[in-house]
Image (spheres, rainbow, N blue to C red):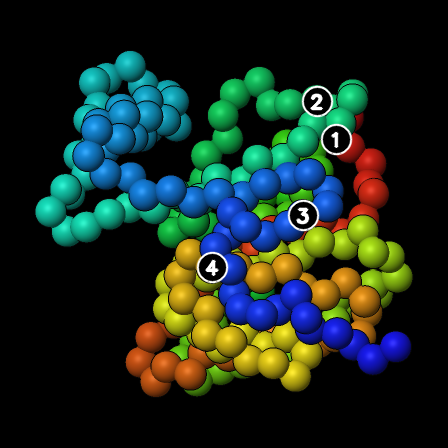
């Protein structure tokens, strides 16, 4: 059977991507009354991170625009051991894991199974420099239909390629790769002066949970 790209009519809002494994991803704007709640939450997280009881305050700029938060909600199988405290990482402070994978992917690893993921196996950010393209590929060694790989645009409007189709992918939209081990997918940064960044998360197959 020829590869099919019928599910790729267009890059869709992240919360409308159908995922068989049960995890969900949503985005929502932070503004108005939500800003104060977020400021309080960030201040609390900062106190925990720096292990201090000193009063801290977070102030968000309410003039410059909205802030959008992406939330990934995953099911927890029986026997799963959750973290006893919140794990927060500042992506700006993380080292680059790889800058040459799939030709041009600049990758930072946010979370993996050992960090406390239950259904998912990895959460990354992937950046493309101006006028670069990731290597078109099916998911490597894809011998099962369990694999779910989602690419969510954070910054910049790239060209998403799935099979023989191209679609513009603006921030806040995502696509699920076609799990047939045939249909290639990638993203193209056609900008001459700015990077494109993606939130990538995936479940590759049934796996042993963290003990």
| Quarter of the figure with the N terminus | bottom right
Identify the element where label 3 is drawn.
Answer: loop
Q: Which residue is mark 3?
A: 19
**Badge nearest the viewer, 1 or 3:** 3
Q: Which residue is mark 4?
A: 173
Identify the element where label 1 is drawn.
Answer: loop
The reply to whether callout 1 and callout 2 are in contact (CB within 8 Å) is yes
**Badge nearest the viewer, 2 or 3:** 3
> Which mark identifies residue 83?
none
Find the distance from the CA under tag 2 to the CA under tag 3.
23 Å
Q: Is residue 128 above or below residue 199?
A: below
> Which mark identifies residue 81?
2
Find the distance from the CA under tag 1 to the CA under tag 2.
7 Å
Residue occupying the point 46% across, 34% down: 88
Residue at the top extreme, as displayed: 53
The reply to whether callout 4 and callout 3 are in contact (CB within 8 Å) is no
**Badge nearest the viewer, 2 or 4:** 4
Q: Position of residue 196 (x, y in %)?
A: 42, 69
Q: Which residue is mark 1?
A: 210
Q: Position of residue 174 (x, y in %)?
A: 52, 59
The reply to whether callout 2 and callout 3 are in contact (CB within 8 Å) is no
Find the distance from the CA under tag 1 to the CA under tag 4.
31 Å
| Quarter of the figure with the C terminus | top right
């Amino acid at each position: 059977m020829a590869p099919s790209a019928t599910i790729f009519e267009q890059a869709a809002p992240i919360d409308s991507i159908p995922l068989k494994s049960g995890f969900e991803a949503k985005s929502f704007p932070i503004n108005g009354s939500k800003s104060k709640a977020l400021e309080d939450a960030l201040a609390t997280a900062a106190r925990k991170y720096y292990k201090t009881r000193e009063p801290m305050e977070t102030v968000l700029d309410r003039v410059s625009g909205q802030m959008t938060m992406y939330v990934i909600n995953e099911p927890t199988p029986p026997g799963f051991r959750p973290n006893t405290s919140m794990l927060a990482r500042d992506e700006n402070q993380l080292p680059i894991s790889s800058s040459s994978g799939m030709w041009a992917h600049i990758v930072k690893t946010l979370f993996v199974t050992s960090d406390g993921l239950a259904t998912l196996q990895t959460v990354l950010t992937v950046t493309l420099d101006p006028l670069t393209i990731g290597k078109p590929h099916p998911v490597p060694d894809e011998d099962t239909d369990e694999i779910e790989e989602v690419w969510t645009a954070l910054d910049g409007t790239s060209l998403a390629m799935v099979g023989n189709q191209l679609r513009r992918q603006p921030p806040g939209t995502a696509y699920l790769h076609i799990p047939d081990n045939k249909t290639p997918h990638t993203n193209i940064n056609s900008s001459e002066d700015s990077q494109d960044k993606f939130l990538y998360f995936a479940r590759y197959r049934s796996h042993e949970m963290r003990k």
